Amino acid sequence: LPLPLTTLPEPSRSLPAPTGSAGPGGPGPVTCGSVVKLLNVQHNVRLHSHDVRYGSGSGQQSVTGVAAADDGNSYWRVRGRTAAVCERGRPVRCGQAIRLTHLGTGRNLHSHRFASPLSGNQEVSAFGEDGEGDYLDDWTVLCSGTYWARDSEVRFQHASTDVFLAVTGEQYGRPIHGQKEVHGAAASSQHNYWKVMEGVFMQPGEVFKAERYHAEL
């Protein structure tokens, strides 16, 4: 059945041209300030948002998964957690809390104790204005090693409610036919893994380069 959603005008913000140069020694870490697309590995859809609000739950801006690799509304900026600054180019550490800000609308990936529309899991929305929302925008990056590597599969755990950012295959009807539900899952599973795909990557800062140099000595 079609989900009752409210369609708002599409934003007209310019989007960056995707780049994917890895450089010597592998692709390196994901850094603050980078703008990326995130692929759910199990379901092959990219994390997406748009000015379409949920017709149930919070009524906030919806977050979905889309199959198209070239959709301009799937870019997210990597930022420090709420009320914290993460300098541009600083690598994100495994276990660090971050925000993911939707480039097209300026709202942050968010979760709270509302039921998601299709599966009844925890709702994931986009919240805030001009990149500023609240502490429910914070997600902890779960990965192996020291830093979030651009070629690794990672999980995002909501810092306040402990759910994992997930896709389990439920599909919307009109007006966003074919897009998959993104929600918060209580347990970790193969549905929780994400990988950085296209993006514009800020080069690691001097602090990271010095740390890596000393680690190699």
Image: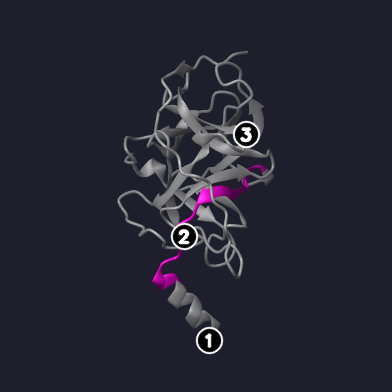
Q: The residue under label 1 is which amino acid type?
A: Leu
Q: Secondary structure at mark 3?
A: loop
Mark with earlier residue (3, 1): 3
Residue at image mark 3: 68
| Residue 207, image x, y percentages | 40, 72
Are the two marked residues, 1 and 2, in contact with CB atoms closer than 8 angstroms? no
Within 10 Å of the Cα at label 1, are there few (<14), some (14-19), or many (20+) other Cα atoms? few
Point 40% across, 71% down: residue: 206
Q: Seen in the image, is 3 located left or right of residue 203? A: right
Within 10 Å of the Cα at label 2, are there few (<14), some (14-19), or many (20+) other Cα atoms? many
Q: Seen in the image, is 87 located left or right of residue 149? A: left
Q: Quadrant of the N terminus?
A: top right
Residue at image mark 2: 92
Q: The residue under label 3 is which amino acid type?
A: Ala
Q: The residue under label 2 is which amino acid type?
A: Val
Mark with earlier residue (2, 3): 3
Magenta residues (range): 191-208
Residue at image mark 1: 217
**Label 3 to label 1, Cα distance in Å?**
44 Å
The image shows residue 6, relative to residue 50, as above or below, that is: above
